Image (tube, rainbow, N blue to C red):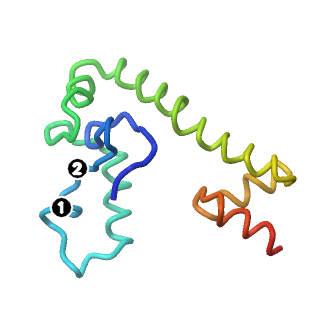
Amino acid sequence: MKYDTKIWHPNISSVTGAICLDILKNEWTPALTIRTALISLQALMCTPVPDDPQDAEVASQFKNNINEFNKTAKLWTENYAKNQAEKKIQEIIDMGFSEEDAKLALQKNGFDIEKSVNYLLSR
């Protein structure tokens, strides 16, 4: 598992998207499910662990200047996450679908354009 969208988080590499989460590495067992991994990742996203970082620069900023960290995280969200979603919505709109349908299809299909278009065409 890794993030394709750039994210500013102490436990996510700002360069590669690699995730520093023990159950994804040395604590992984076949008994763990995808659900378990996603719940653990959600918890990590809500509660960063800057003392065990994937990205030392981000962790340092988190620990030493939380206001600057929050500003940078917000900027990265606006620049990377929102722009990608808007581009995908526009791509589907350009195919002749409404904005409302494009948003709904993307939400239902994990923001995968191909699956979203197939969903819209099968209705």
Side of 105 relative to 36 (left or right): right
Query: How would you rate the neighbour count of disc 1 (Cα within 10 Å): few for under 14, some for 14-19, many for 20 or more?
Result: few
- Quadrant where the N terminus is found in the figure: bottom left
Q: In this view, does 66 lie above or below 10?
A: above
Would you identify the image quadrant in which residue 82 lies?
Answer: top right
| Disc 2, SS | loop
User: Which mark is on residue 20?
Assistant: 2
Side of 30 relative to 38 (left or right): left
| Disc 1, SS | loop
Q: Which residue is drawn at 36% across and 47% down?
A: 45
- Quadrant where the C terminus is found in the figure: bottom right
Camera-side residue of 80 and 72: 80
Kind of residue at badge 1? Lys
Q: Residue at x 60, y 59 (%)?
A: 112
The answer to the question of whether label 2 and label 1 lie on touching residues, with beta carbons closer than 8 A, is yes
Q: Where is residue 37 in the image (x, y as percent from the top left)?
A: 32, 65
| Number of numbered markers | 2
Kind of residue at badge 2? Cys
Would you identify the image quadrant in which residue 27 lies?
Answer: bottom left
Q: Which residue is drawn at 73% across and 63% down?
A: 117
First reached walking from the N terminus: tag 2 or tag 1: 2
Residue that numbered label 1 is attached to: 25
Side of 112 relative to 116 (left or right): left
Give how far apart the Cα atoms at labels 2 and 1 are: 8 Å
Query: How would you rate the neighbour count of disc 2 (Cα within 10 Å): few for under 14, some for 14-19, many for 20 or more?
Result: many
Side of 31 relative to 118 (left or right): left
Residue situated furthest bottom in the rendering: 31
User: Which mark is on residue 69?
Assistant: none
Q: Position of residue 12 (x, y in %)?
A: 30, 43
Q: Position of residue 31 (x, y in %)?
A: 23, 81
Q: Where is residue 65 in the image (x, y as percent from the top left)?
A: 28, 18
